Image: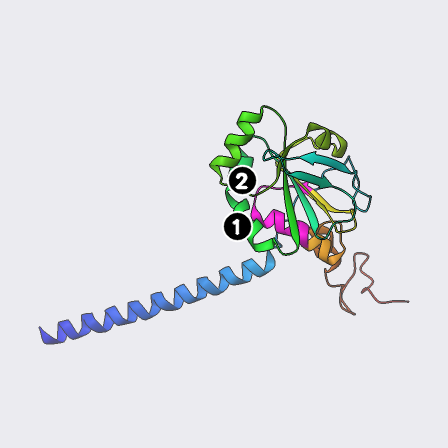
Amino acid sequence: MTEALLVSQILLWIGFVALALVTLALARQIGVLHERVAPLGALMMDGGIDVGDAAPKFELTDLSGRPVTIGGPRPRATMLLFVSPTCPVCKKLLGLVRDFVRDEKRHLDLVLVGDGERRAQEELIRRHRLQDVPYVIAPEVGMRFQVGKLPYAILVDEQGIVRAKGLVNSREHLESLLVAKETGYVSIQQYLGEREPAPAAGTAGPDGTGGQNR
């Protein structure tokens, strides 16, 4: 009886150690996959004001009666976030905006831009507790930038130049616009693409010549 109990305990410990080793191996493999998968940035759409062009200037008033200036030199960069009360993805994204504004407020001003009935816009910002964030009902802004899909964000730097833009549906997408501005690349995809390592000497190139200069 004692020997059977001892054997069962040994087998249990062997199984536990084997399970722990498998778990560690899986965790390591997941880490490798995370390193290999590039972060997805905001999807930039063609049309409207191009990246590198000056943003058109607007003098507006938000839903709280505060003046809002878009374009021209500013103390901080400005991110325009185009949203709508009828857009489910917009509602999901706005749930993340409060923390994003708090973390980036030292060097970024966020302006929410909407179109449609005022009461619906006010309910949208009240539901997400974004009364402190400027919200303008300004269809002319969306038309000037040719915004066709929502939610859409445009980053304008301190000199009033458009530095990044694209469709966004997560905080990572919003942050990718800031990365594009900091690195000087039009998009995070372009930045990652140009960082791809060149083939090493002696490695066969696409024409099978070994990739060496002649």
Asked if residue 154 can be seen in this view, the reply is yes
Vertical order, 214 against 108 (above or below):
below
The residue tagged with tag 1: helix, strand or loop?
Answer: helix
Q: Main secondary structure of the magenta part?
A: helix
In front of the other: 184 or 127: 127
Furthest toward the right, the residue is: 214
Name the spot of residue 49 as percent of width and height, x first: 79, 38
Tag 2: residue type? Gln
Name the spot of residue 5 as percent of width and height, x first: 14, 72
Vertical order, 162 against 85 (above or below):
below
Asked if residue 43 can be seen in this view, the reply is no
Name the spot of residue 210 as percent of width and height, x first: 80, 65
Between label 2 and label 1, give the one nearer the viewer.
Answer: 2
Tag 1: residue type? Asp
Marker disc for residue 99: 1
Judging from the image, the colouring scheme is rainbow
Q: Which residues are magenta?
A: 166-178
Q: Which residue is mark 2?
A: 131
Q: Residue at x 60, y 34 (%)?
A: 83
Q: Is residue 16 left or right of residue 62?
A: left
The residue tagged with tag 2: helix, strand or loop?
Answer: loop
Quarter of the figure that contains the N terminus: bottom left
User: Considering only order in the chain, which callout, 1 or 2, is on the residue closer to the N terminus?
Assistant: 1
Name the spot of residue 100 as percent of width and height, x first: 56, 50
Vertical order, 94 against 184 (above or below):
above
Q: Is residue 180 left or right of residue 1?
A: right
Q: Residue at x 74, y 36 (%)?
A: 59
